[in-house]
Image: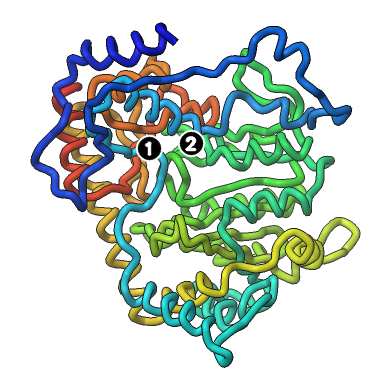
Amino acid sequence: MSLMNNLSTSMISSSSSTFLVPTSFNSRTQSVSVPLKNINIVKCVATPQEQQNAYKTKVSRNANIAKLQAGYLFPEVARRRAAHLLKYPNAQVISLGIGDTTEPIPDVITSAMSKRSHALSTLEGYSGYGAEQGEKALRAALASTFYRNLGIEDDDIFVSDGAKCDISRLQVVFGSSVTMAVQDPSYPAYVDSSVIMGQTGQFQKDVEKYGNIEYMRCTPENGFFPDLSKVARTDIIFFCSPNNPTGAAATREQLTRLVKFAKDNGSIIVYDSAYAMYMSDDNPRSIFEIPGAKEVAIETSSFSKYAGFTGVRLGWTVVPKQLLFSDGFPVAKDFNRIICTCFNGASNIAQAGGLACLSPEGLEAMQEVIGFYKENTKIIVETFNSLGFKVYGGKNAPYVWVHFPGRNSWDVFSEILEKTHIVTTPGSGFGPGGEGFIRVSAFGHRENVLEACRRFKQLYN
């Protein structure tokens, strides 16, 4: 107990940061600031006798979950942020780490959700369980908005509570016996869900990889697109474009090669297009723009980063009828079975919001929000460029990928957090190919982004 008291008081009194308690931010844009006060912390620790007598069931722990290394990346970043606030309770911490949206959902969208919500209190407007696959009107709007003239039909689209959730549902469809490939670096949910499903071997600490996963290295030297001639055949290929975390977007020619590679190997591509609306270059926004993709690809996407639905939760997955397993059985039928078994459908209120997103007014409003974040991205890119860093991404995605050659990315994360009170994301959290990089998110209020860039300049000038 005395140790914890000493820790809380000594860390507060010894803070030498120059970024404590800024006074120029208004209440709308201010990050979390915790007033300085006496903090008493009680640490509850089981005694050896208590541990010895703890009741244990006879159920074995899932050995696959036991393979996972530490915590999932973003909760670990949040844990370190919380520890930093305990150490510096007066610090104005700016979070450019986890890609969580910050700007209000446009009124045209929330008004539709509000109307649907109030309708539930009337006999005429009440509805209970809906179709697990999503409401017909929303599926039709998704098909006509994002997949017009691409041969995707309304019933190829499954509405969900987000792309991340659908990634795990797809893993249940694929089962434990498949092999998988993933971009390196990439969104950690692909690898972690594969580990949990039992598709992988043990974690190999010397190379920072799991056995039985094909890590497709994506580097500045290869334009963040893997050399497919060096990639072994796998059953499943996870591919995200524009990419999280690098911000790189695959060209039409590159995706054509990827589809051909999958066809030649009899593989299935799981294509994550959650950032497609951020695309500035003339690159495909859907894998189904590539001829033949419907026979080898699934696409998953989300309203999270378009409409600020990170808390509302609404996404979709496209499973074309032409996609077949080796025995000729349609993948969509198995996915539908998993959806019906594990999911009762997206919230009807959220789906009303999704339908409003796809109205002409909603699409315009989403483009305004996306444009705001893209301006943030430009500010961050220009800042690191001015400091002499090699910077990637930013043009087609809300993420900036900054290179710190020869540095451990968690060390860089800690240095930035300790000296500037800014949360970023260490590149190695996205795979061994991310070592030596940090990801800076453009999701933030403009005043916070400008202040963060000022701090970056003060630290690295």
Q: Where is residue 217 drawn, in percent x and y?
A: 55, 32
- Which residue is painted at 52% across and 80% down in the image? 141
Residue under pointer 1: 97
Could you tell me how far apart the alpha carbons at marks 1 and 2 are, in whole angstroms? 8 Å
In the rendered image, the quadrant that contains the C terminus is: top left
Decide if residue 65 is on the left or right side of residue 356. right
Q: Residues within 10 Å of mark 1 (few under 14, many from 20)?
A: many
Q: Where is residue 88 drawn, in percent x and y?
A: 27, 23
Q: Amino acid at mark 2?
A: Phe
Q: Residues within 10 Å of mark 2 (few under 14, many from 20)?
A: some
In the rendered image, the quadrant that contains the N terminus is: top left
Q: Is residue 461 among what the camera can see?
A: no
SS state under label 1: loop
Q: Amino acid at mark 1?
A: Gly
- Which residue is painted at 35% across and 33% down in the image? 424
Against 439, residue 87 (above or below) is above
Against 334, residue 413 (above or below) is above
- Which residue is painted at 58% across and 84% down in the image? 126
Q: Is residue 178 among what the camera can see?
A: yes
Badge 1 vs badge 2, beta-carbon distance below 8 Å: yes
From this viewpoint, which residue is outermost toward the left? 24
Q: Where is residue 81 drawn, in percent x and y?
A: 38, 29
Tell me how many marks there are. 2
In this rendered view, identify the residue nearer to me: 10 or 337: 10
- Which residue is painted at 18% across and 15% down in the image? 16
Decide if residue 178 is on the left or right side of residue 455. right
In this rendered view, identify the residue nearer to me: 248 or 76: 76
Residue under pointer 2: 74
On residue 34, which mark appears? none
In this rendered view, identify the residue nearer to me: 432 or 307: 307
